Amino acid sequence: MEDGEVVALSAVFGELLQGAKNESEAQTLLDFWEALPKIEEEGLFIEAGQLSRELKLITKEIGLVDSYILAASKREQLNLWTLDKKLQEFYSRL
């Protein structure tokens, strides 16, 4: 993160904020959101839906936010760092 190699995605931070345990944790997340580089996300949910449909991701238990991450990675040619084996498998197919 210190080298600017992490990109913030609104859908990811939305999910993180949804699960924040308290105001302090939420503020920390918002601080990271403000500090991290971002990509242009317009139309990305549509691309995520298309990608999900094409790869039948919903049948593989990969939801729309994870599809969003894959679509962003594909569009922007981003490396994906994840411990989710299913997500990593589909990322390697892109």
Image: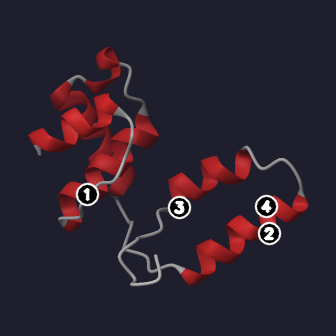
Q: Callout 4 environment at 10 Å: few (<14), some (14 to 19), or many (20+)?
A: some
Q: Would you name the residue on which mark 1 appears?
A: 73
Q: Provide residue 33's location: percent of width, then percent of height.
A: 60, 72
Q: CA gap, disc 2 to disc 4?
A: 4 Å
Residue wearing tag 2:
27
Amino acid type at mark 3: Ser
> Comparing marks 1 and 3, which lies closer to the viewer?
1
Do the numbered discs 1 and 2 sit on residues whose CB atoms are within 8 Å? no
Q: CA distance from mark 1 to mark 3?
A: 14 Å
SS category of the residue bearing label 3? helix
| Badge 4 element | helix
Contact, mark 2 vs mark 4 (Cβ under 8 Å)? yes
User: Sequence-wise, which precedes: disc 1 or disc 3?
Assistant: 3
Judge the density around disc 1: few (<14), some (14-19), many (≥20) Cα neighbours within 10 Å. some
Q: Which residue is mark 4?
A: 26
- x 62%, y 47%: residue: 15
